[in-house]
Amino acid sequence: MATIGRLLIANRGEIACRIARTARDLGMVPIAVYSDVDAQALHVSACDEAVYLGPEGHGSPYLDIAKVVHAAVQARADAVHPGFGFLSERAEFASAVLDAGLVWVGPPPAVMQLLGRKDTARQLAKQLGVPVIPGVESSDRLPAMPRQRARALDELAERAACVGFPLLIKAVAGGGGRGMRVVRQPKDLRNELAIAAEEATAAFGEGTLLVERFIVHGRHIEVQVLADAFGDVIHLGERECSVQRRHQKIVEETPSPGVDPHLRGKLCNAAVRLMKGAGYVSAGTVEFLLNDDTGEFYLLEVNTRLQVEHGVTELVTGLDLVALQLAIAQRKSLQLEQSDVQFHGHAIEARLCAEDPALGFAPQSGPVCLWQPPTGAGVRVDHGLHPVDRVPVHYDAMVAKVMAHAADRAAAIGRLDRALGALRLHGVANNRAYLQQILRAPAFAAGRTTTAFVADHWPASAPPEPLDLAALAVWRHGPALRRRFRNNPWRADVTVLQVANGERWQVALAVDGDGFRFGVEAFNDPLLVRAPATPHRLTVEALNATAGPGDCAQGVLTVDVGTVRHHWVLFREGQTLYGQHASGRELSAAEHSLVPEPARGGISAGGVAAIGAAVVTQVLVAAADAVVAGQPLIALEAMKMLTVLKAPRDGVVAAVYAAVGDAVAAGALLVELQPEV
């Protein structure tokens, strides 16, 4: 029997912190690995020891098998836990760990290879009578040479078109939404296959694809399975993960509101049958797509690792899945019969991500001026942030998982909503408010959740509250305005603020005794700005600003508007202002000068710019190239998401301002276009 005394955690962020917590509880020494970007990260200090892997470059050191295994040997680790993401589902990594004489916390490499690939998992499922979605897959790994690769993609597109549209493209070698694209029109299929192959190659080291019929309104249901080395396999119930954006889950819960006891039995039995037939060992998850109308379900994939959302299962069962993984890895029996597993109440999880819903959930990076997780009965938060930190561009956008457990679903939803309202994540754009919108949606409360939920409930792009805009302007310029115009109180100062969706608003402030008068209106031509009428008055009761840690300035503002008092917590980083009203309402805006910047040739004719900070992975055009509307120009990767920017109109490339490997800032002009002459 293997004994684990020293455990290397081959991961980062919240999952590394979570594994370290259980390892320490079991008397093990947790050992972290880190890149140069993560030298000060929380997961490094959460472990007893840490090994430096190297700098972030064109390839992440967290994906370098040789470096990670060398780190484990160097640290005298007994075992390696892969967490999720990165190398967690790479069979060759598991083999390398075992070849180094270490314990692998996970299934055998051969089983990982069988189930971790969607093509071979489908074949096994068919043999065992587990239903699969109609589809086709690449006959082999896609060739590396461009010409042969193009031919292989052409052939795959021809076969896939016969399945019928809409189609869903998937990466055979991994999950997490990478390499996944929905194709609704035949004309888009070939191009989307190429993009998916590129994204899959970047994420998993190979671009082999599976193309299936896309079921528009289905539920994403998964079953948690545990199996030991002695052939015992049990399930821990199902989770529903239907609420997704970019094919990545953002809200998960157990039990599913759309699964009755009879259907639950069928799903769980199918999952156990598949895992037992594969010879599975460790914790794993079988994912299904459920047709809500017919009750039919189909295998989606098998995750041969711990899931991001494992925490909700832990909350309703009282079991520690990481502890069970570690026990199984030491060749201990489960010591659990299926009848021993008891389920209590309802648990729900929301993934807090550094992303902007108003920009199509584009990943965001930058400083965290304040992180304060919620606490309280029935609330659990798994995270990897210091109170003051920075979200890097190189990794996944998820920064925390906020979970709530209660006696029933309605109580769990309410508890999670309150927890999200209580947390503080200031300085980097995030989806906290959007998650609350989801929880408050009548369709969500009624349990009408499908994989189309986010698309069907896209947040309206409402204009910002004028009072919030005024608060940002008062906090930023109020004291200086009062000093400058104390002898001329009716002189107005104009601040121009650009909000997340690109709209600009101008705020006029005028000193008025112990307060300010303010007016807000839409921004037009900066050369024609005139101070708008200022009919609204606010009285400042408290205003302070202090130099915060790192790059942030922080402060508070309290104002009275009539008989109503308002409070904001405010932050500033460079030209970006961020405020959160006491009600939980948030506003982030960039301050713009009223003086026009010098023109750069051709900018007025249009071009494409980075939505967020990213790394350039492909430049598909050169100066003087003629392009048509919709033609791919440049590919970016940010937080594991590949984005291809396309020409907004026909034209000629005037200039390309980025090269492969460049790190570009949000808003940076990448390709400049001019009209065809």
Image (tube, grey):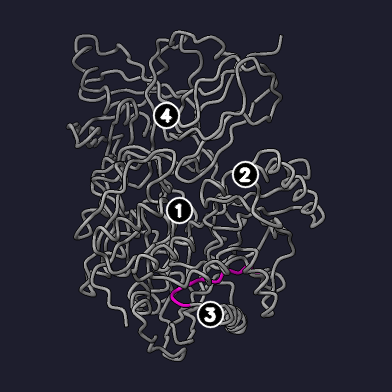
Q: Are marks 3 and 2 in contact (CB under 8 Å)?
A: no
Q: How many marks?
A: 4
Which quadrant of the rendered structure holds the N terminus?
A: bottom left
Amino acid at circle 2: Ala
Q: Residue at label 2?
A: 144
Distance (Cα) linking label 2 and label 4: 31 Å
Decide: is 109 above or below 188.
below
Distance (Cα) linking label 4 and label 3: 47 Å
Query: Residue visible at 19% across and 35% down?
Result: 548
Amino acid at circle 4: Ala
Q: Quadrant of residue 37?
A: top left
Amino acid at circle 1: Leu
Q: Residue at label 3?
A: 279
| Residue 391 drawn at (x, y percent) | 34, 43
Q: Earlier in the sequence, mark 3 or mark 2?
A: 2
Distance (Cα) linking label 1 and label 2: 40 Å
User: Regarding mark 3 in the picture, which secondary structure is present there?
Assistant: loop
Nearer to us in this view, 287 or 431: 287
Of circles 1 and 3, the one toward us is: 3
Nearer to us in this view, 117 or 609: 117
Q: Which residues are magenta?
A: 281-290
Mark 3 neighbour class, 10 Å CA radius: few under 14, some 14 to 19, many 20 or more = some
Q: Residue at label 4?
A: 665
Q: Earlier in the sequence, mark 4 or mark 3?
A: 3
